[in-house]
Image (cartoon, grey):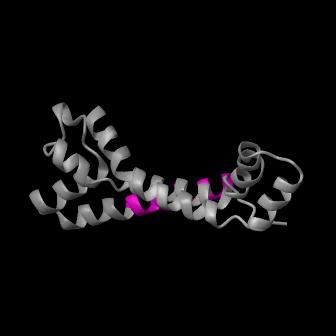
Amino acid sequence: MMLIIVYTLWADIGYNVVLFTAGIEGVPKEFDEAAAIDGAGPIRRFLSIKLPLMGRTFAFVAIMTMANYFQMFAQFRIFAPKGGMNNSAMVLTNYIYRTSFISFDMGYASAIAAGLFLIVFVVAMIQNKMMRADWSYE
């Protein structure tokens, strides 16, 4: 399980770095310049100006990462193709795969997939409510 966690973090870090880099670049330069004129150093400007204004980026990355982790398939299919010992590494996506393509029970697999969609949707909506990002820079 630790190998799957490390691999997943390694695979996702590039995507998240690109998103956070774009988020930092999306912060208006006027705020940074005003803080520099007021005498704030680079660390203080980052912690007090850029980081709080990146709320939208943090919310987007959190929701996308959560949705991706609910839908993990390849990592578990590669590292634990049969579900691990006593199905300890069996995740919902692999169960859907096993039900549909090994047991050939497409109806039941479709129902599970619809349930997975509902779970991801509900969790994303809850996360969206909890992470209410300020969409203005005023």
As drawn, 137 above or below 36: below
- Residue 98: percent from the left, percent from the top? 16, 54
| Residues rendered magenta in the picture | 115-130
Q: Is residue 94 left or right of residue 59?
A: left
Which image quadrant: the N terminus? top left
In reply to whether residue 122 is colored magenta, the answer given is yes
Residue 21: image quadrant is bottom right
- Residue 56: percent from the left, percent from the top? 65, 61
The answer to which of 97 and 77 lies nearer the viewer is 77
The answer to which of 65 and 105 lies nearer the viewer is 65
Q: Is residue 110 left or right of residue 37?
A: left
Residue 112: image quadrant is bottom left
The residue drawn where x is 26% and y is 54% is 73
As drawn, 10 above or below 25: above
In reply to whether residue 123 is colored magenta, the answer given is yes
The residue drawn where x is 54% and y is 53% is 62
